[in-house]
Amino acid sequence: MKTRTLIHFKDSPLMGKINIVIGGLTLALTVLITAISIFYYSFILSDRLYERTRQAGKNAAETLNFNYKNIMDRLTAICGTVEFASDIRTLTSPSVSYTVKERLVQNELSDLAGCNYLVQSSLVLSGDGQTAYSLYRNPLPDSAQFFTSEDLDAVQGVTCLPIRPSPLRSSVPVLPLVVPISVDSAEYAIVDLSEDTPDIYVVVFLDCTKLHQSLTLAGTGLVNGTYYIFTDTGKPLSAASHDKKVNPLKLPETSAVIHSLTANGLSETSAETSDFYLAASSMPRSGLILLNCVPKEPLKDIFGPTIGILAAVLCLVVGLLFVLSLLMTRYITQPVKQLVSIVELIRENHYHEKQTLETGDEIGHLCIAINQMYDTIQKQMERIKQEESEKYLAEIRLLTEQINPHFLYNTLDCIQSEVKRGESDTAANMIQYLAEYLRIGLSNGADLIPLSNEIRHANAYVCLMNQRFGQSIRFMYHLPPSLSKHLIVKTILQPLVENSIKHGFGVDAPGIPISTPAIEVIIAAEEETLVININDNGSGFDTQELEQLLESSSAVQSGHVGLLNVYHRLSAYYGKDHVQFSFSSIPYYCNVISIRLPLTA
């Protein structure tokens, strides 16, 4: 049954296969997009919760800052009077009894205890920390040691000490706000900022339960977080909540947030850990830092039991997508790749063994059609090659026959003149050079000649020109022995040498004569490329003009018929894409025409 289904699917129309694959992919993509949307929604919620944490922390800091200002304003009004300064003198007098001293501060303690709804109670402590005075309604315990020496040593100006149980109501956690006060020389009570022992300490105990409620109320409608209070040095005043699996006070991110806030002088900053969102706000007036810590909600808490169903559906879709991709790869992708490979082999002319596809669908029929088309193309290419070969031979002969016949006539006239003058040796040399020139140029009708013969042909031409015009043009060449028998299209050096003599040296044409004219032909092989450089020290040429000449294929206006003739003949034999001409010119020093050809035709 399985084999029959696979055979049916393999031979079914291509469109049917594509429909099946597209349908499966659509289903898979739909579920995948749904899953991505859910996760994206969770990220949106996460960003929103992060922003709300920051806003709630800011609101809570403003609330705490407002209450702190209110308490400090009331404390200044109560304890900043001349009467209280007089009371402080009495408190520090050893001759006054404890009962009198305690009665003396009842009004101030009562006013402080009622100055703000966050204040749970208040206390006056002697400068040495050994004697305390409280309200009558808050009797002191047996021990009067409320603060350790380390606590009092940490008091520098108005200072908040770590949260602890209330010394007056042990069941209530409080945040002690300690203010060191001394009487100055003008008999005014002032906050003692020195490191010396103050006259007294005024302690206001803030009810932490009410404090937390006020901070939580400030973030109502935003988030439900836990607030921690730090000093401006980063020391925590709050204890970690015992109901959290991870202690946020010991996280490195918490320390980094507090340090960033204090080191950079920021008013607020925020961060995110793997378990919490953190938002810290500084309160310069109190020197405190408030940290709002909001735990992250797990994904399962956001989506509930739906997350399990979505995960199962996602796994199912991934499995279905995997099966569909295998089917698509086996029955569509691989055959198409094989067809592409066949077409590439045909394009590169490497398709020697025909390939077939064992499918009865459109791809199989297309493979058969490609093979038939290949046979037709091969027959047409053979016919085209034959026609191009015939056309090429005719074109080469035509271009070769375009050599200026005036050179032959003028040379014969010059030989006749030398004979009449009795210069038989000169005439004989010219006849010898002309014979060699014609013999190599004709080459028994051959289109290709060895490079050594091409050099001899150019040399014979230079010798004839020297005899005709009484010149002393030096002809030099460099030809590696390994290239001497390499075949090349004949008569390509002579037209370029002729250009150098006529246009560069001013021989038989208008121009500036050169005192020591020289022509050098350098032939070399660079990997699979034959490089021919024709150098002279003539008056030079315009390189851009020659480049445009080759592009336009017209030498009517420029007079460089020989150069264009050589370019056409080389392009006809090697192909235009395989022939490269380049030019450089430094007049009267070095002018170069460089030709690059395939080393193997």
Image: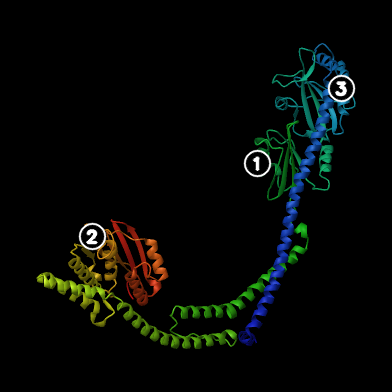
> In the current view of this chain or complex, which residue is farthest to the top?
95
Q: Does 525 sit left or right of 435 as displayed?
A: right
Q: Nearer the viewer, mark 3 or mark 1?
A: 1
427 is higher (above) or lower (below) than 40? below
Q: Amino acid at mark 1?
A: Ala
The percent position of residue 328, horizontal first and vertical second, equals: 61, 77
576 is higher (above) or lower (below) than 520? below
Q: Which residue is pictured at 22% across the width and 63% down the height?
A: 476
User: Mark 1 falls on what kind of element?
Assistant: helix
Q: Foreground residue, 443 or 271?
A: 443
User: Mark 2 falls on what kind of element?
Assistant: loop
Tell me how far mark 3 sits from mark 1, CA to CA: 42 Å
Q: Which residue is mark 1?
A: 256
Q: Quadrant of residue 460?
A: bottom left
Q: Is residue 528 visible?
A: no
Tell me how far mark 1 sits from mark 2, CA to CA: 83 Å
Q: Amino acid at mark 2?
A: Pro
Q: Nearer the viewer, mark 2 or mark 3?
A: 2
Look at the image and name its color scheme.
rainbow
Q: Which mark is residue 108?
A: 3
- Number of numbered discs overlaid on the protein picture: 3
User: Mark 3 falls on what kind of element?
Assistant: helix
The percent position of residue 248, horizontal first and vertical second, equals: 71, 44
Q: Which residue is pictured at 31% across the width and 77% down the height?
A: 402
Q: Which residue is mark 2?
A: 517
Q: Amino acid at mark 3?
A: Glu
Give the mark, 2 or 3, whose residue is nearer the N terminus: 3
